Image: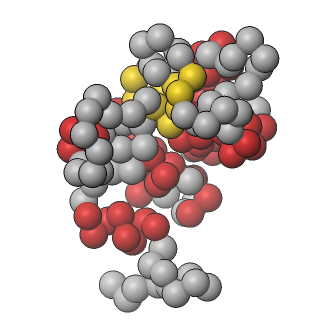
Amino acid sequence: MRERRGATGLLHPVLRQRRTRRLAAGLADARLLAPDDERIRSTIFAIADDLTDGPFVFRYRPEKTDDGFDGEGEGSFTVCSFWLVSALVAIGELDSARTHCEKLIGAASTLGLYAEELDPTTERHLGNFPQALTHLALINAS
């Protein structure tokens, strides 16, 4: 397969990720291929199966990826959680998308805002707060 390069000259993220054979939640963008394409559907289902704890999506599994950080790892990446909701809608999995979205909305702070990460057990907000990119993903998912 020929390498496709974007305007910046970098490989497209899907092609880059395929080379590493590791799943990353950023691949949930259902706009990369037609929503009925089996490759995008299987990628979305793989993310839902392998990178989630309920509605909370991790960018990757730290125990399977050497990310250079020692310690207990990180929380779920909130923007990826809303990206998964949008991807589920795009492929017609509306009930699952609605369930995930309702749980995520319930995890908002008392101000209705989201941090960069959420602890899936306590729903404690971690990292940058508020996180604008997460709010854009929420708007797109709604």
Residue at left offset 58%, top offset 84%: 8
Residue 50, position as x, y percentages in the image: 32, 36
Vertical placement of 117 versus 14: above or below? Answer: above
Toward which corner of the image does residue 110 lie, by quadrant?
top right
Residue at left offset 35%, top offset 44%: 60
Q: Quadrant of the C terminus?
A: top right
Q: Quadrant of the N terminus?
A: bottom left
Query: Residue lying farthest front?
Result: 70
Residue 35, position as x, y percentages in the image: 57, 53
Residue at left offset 61%, top offset 37%: 128
Which one is nearer the viewer's eye here, 66 or 84? 66
Residue 127 visible (yes or no): yes
Horizontal arrangement in the rendering, residue 96 relative to residue 11 (left or right):
right
Residue at left offset 41%, top offset 57%: 39
Horizontal arrangement in the rendering, residue 125 relative to residue 54 (left or right):
right
Residue 55, position as x, y percentages in the image: 50, 24
Toward which corner of the image does residue 32 lie, by quadrant?
bottom right
Residue 92 visible (yes or no): no
Colour mode of the rendering: secondary structure
Vertical placement of 56 versus 65: above or below? Answer: above
How many circles with numbers are drawn on the protein? 0
Residue 5, position as x, y percentages in the image: 50, 85
